[in-house]
Amino acid sequence: MGRRRVDAASADRGGSSTLRVMRAWQLHDTTGPENYSLDEVPVPQPGPGEVRIALEVVAINHLDLWVSRGLPAPPTLPFITGADGTGTIDAVGEGVTRVSVGDEVIVDPSLSCGRCRSCLAGDIVYCPEYGILGEHHPGTLAEFIVVPERNAVRRPAGLDPEVAGSFGLATGTAYRMLRRARLTAGDVLLVVGVGGGVSSAAMALGRAMGARVFVTSRSDDKIAWAVEHGAEAGFDSSDEFAKALKAASGSSADVVVDNVGPATWGQTMRAAGPGGRIVVCGSTSGPKVEITMPVLFFKQLEIIGSTMFTHGEFAEVVDLVGSGAVRPPIDRTYDFAQLPEALARMDAGDQLGKLAFRVR
Ligand SMILES: [Zn+2]
């Protein structure tokens, strides 16, 4: 879909120095997603080193559901969530040098102190002050957002704004996971529980990195969708998928992405072959798993935790998506006012890829 011009109503509110208020989805309580309301709030002003982005497309993640349930609670209420977005810089604070008014940018959702040893080494994910837009700092579910200039990454020319505004958090997370698991061309990659943002991004990235990609799901429709999007085959998550993988691929998995946890963990350990790497960034079916120790040491498996990504990893993902090498799937694009409908779809686990919103 092509870009749309700013309509008259939002031009009155935005796009000029006279702008005072904007629409934003604010969370008013942490008892669930019914506490979001579309409010008019003051437009944020950029301070030194910060830029303001007039958002064009934004997207939601499971994070927006978790925060609405207080897992974790936001720093203040009401609070604007949202970690993904793309738009045009419309104001800059003092001392900004990397970007200018008029630049089309993608929001990098990682925040860090910029001064500690981890930050100076580029390992911002280990910064004691590490945070995420929409969880620790007001997010993208608004007409405008103010971020530090380094969080505004130039949007590659020609990249569809719906893709640009929706891939960030999930694809960045999946990219770091596959990097930490040392996925290489020709590897067998098994993505357990496909359909959500991170798992579908892992599938798309795995293909682009030259791996043979297999998936599991409890839904035949999701497996069929994954096969249409480049997976070789898919298996039932609630069945013995380790055997099914071996039958279909002739091999065990070199890398398993499992964000499901206890419901699939036994099969995941079986599905990983000698020297296999199991990489985890979440655990949707519960917080604890059992590890059969002989399986761990005889097969010399590695279990790798991963969370978020560095600015450097985000820049690499922007290049991969911008070049067309990776196209993170989009489930639906909604009007900005349709957030409750989209949150309900995500809460039900029905989506196949990202849920995006046109802000203007
Ligand atoms: Zn730091």
Image (cartoon, grey):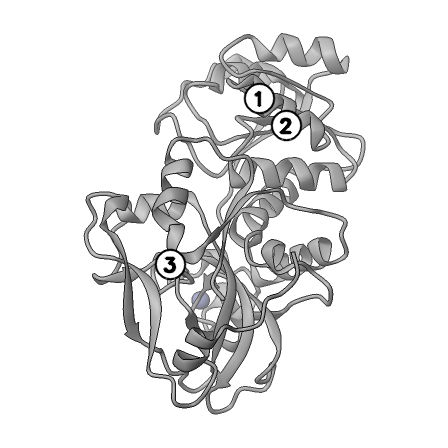
Seen at 62% across and 46% down, the residue is 175
Viewport quadrant of the N terminus: bottom right
Mark 2 or 3, nearer chain start: 3
Three-letter amino acid code of the residue under disc 3:
Gly
Give the CA separation, mark 2 to mark 3: 30 Å
Depicted 143 relative to depicted 60: above or below: below
Q: Percent x, y for residue 34?
A: 24, 45
Depicted 60 relative to depicted 292: above or below: below
User: Tag 1's secondary structure?
Assistant: helix
Check if mark 1's residue and mark 2's residue have beta carbons within 8 Å.
yes
Three-letter amino acid code of the residue under disc 2:
Trp
Label 3, on which residue? 134
Judged by depth in the image, the label closer to the viewer, 1 or 3, is: 1
Seen at 35% across and 78% down, the residue is 43
User: Tag 2's secondary structure?
Assistant: helix
Alpha-carbon neighbours of circle 1 within 10 Å: few (<14), some, or many (≥20)? few
Alpha-carbon neighbours of circle 3 within 10 Å: few (<14), some, or many (≥20)? many
User: Tag 3's secondary structure?
Assistant: loop
Alpha-carbon neighbours of circle 2 within 10 Å: few (<14), some, or many (≥20)? some
